[in-house]
Amino acid sequence: MDEGVDPTSMCKRLVSSMQQEAVLETVAPSAIRALFEDWMTQLEKEVLTFAKEKREVNPEALAKEFNISLESGGYLVKKLKEEGKI
């Protein structure tokens, strides 16, 4: 076995990951997650259209225009910039 691998640590991470997935599944079943992902895809399209029309993309403008929180506006700006879309 590779000396750099710690089986105990690896098992703990695996169990932790499985527990987190189980918690997520109870909070947001797959159907709800799918709906959220669809909504986010549509919202991103609308934000990109807004950005082209208004030439303004900042968390405050997005929060006001799309009736979302300032934090959500910031998340969208960061995500779209990281993806090179804005």
Image (tube, helix red, strand yellow):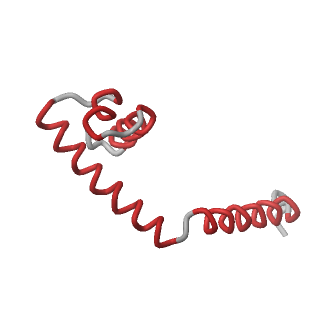
Is 39 located above or below residue 57 in the figure? below
- Residue 28, percent from left and from top: 55, 64
Is 65 located above or below residue 22 in the figure? above
**Quadrant that contains the C terminus:** top left
Q: Using residue 40 as the reference point, say whether residue 51 is left or right of it.
A: left
Q: Using residue 53 as the reference point, say whether residue 42 is left or right of it.
A: right
Q: Which of the 4 image quadrants contains residue 49?
A: top left
**Quadrant that contains the N terminus:** bottom right
Q: Residue at position x 34%, y 63% from top?
A: 38
Q: Which of the 4 image quadrants contains residue 61?
A: top left
- Residue 9, percent from left and from top: 84, 58
Q: Residue at position x 88%, y 63% from top?
A: 8
Q: Which of the 4 image quadrants contains residue 39?
A: bottom left
- Residue 53, percent from left and from top: 11, 36
Q: Using residue 14 as the reference point, say whether residue 35 is left or right of it.
A: left
The residue sitting at the front extreme is 67
The residue sitting at the bottom extreme is 31
Is 48 located above or below residue 5 in the figure? above
- Residue 67, percent from left and from top: 32, 39
Q: Residue at position x 61%, y 62% from top?
A: 27
The residue sitting at the right extreme is 8
Q: Using residue 12 as the reference point, say whether residue 42 is left or right of it.
A: left
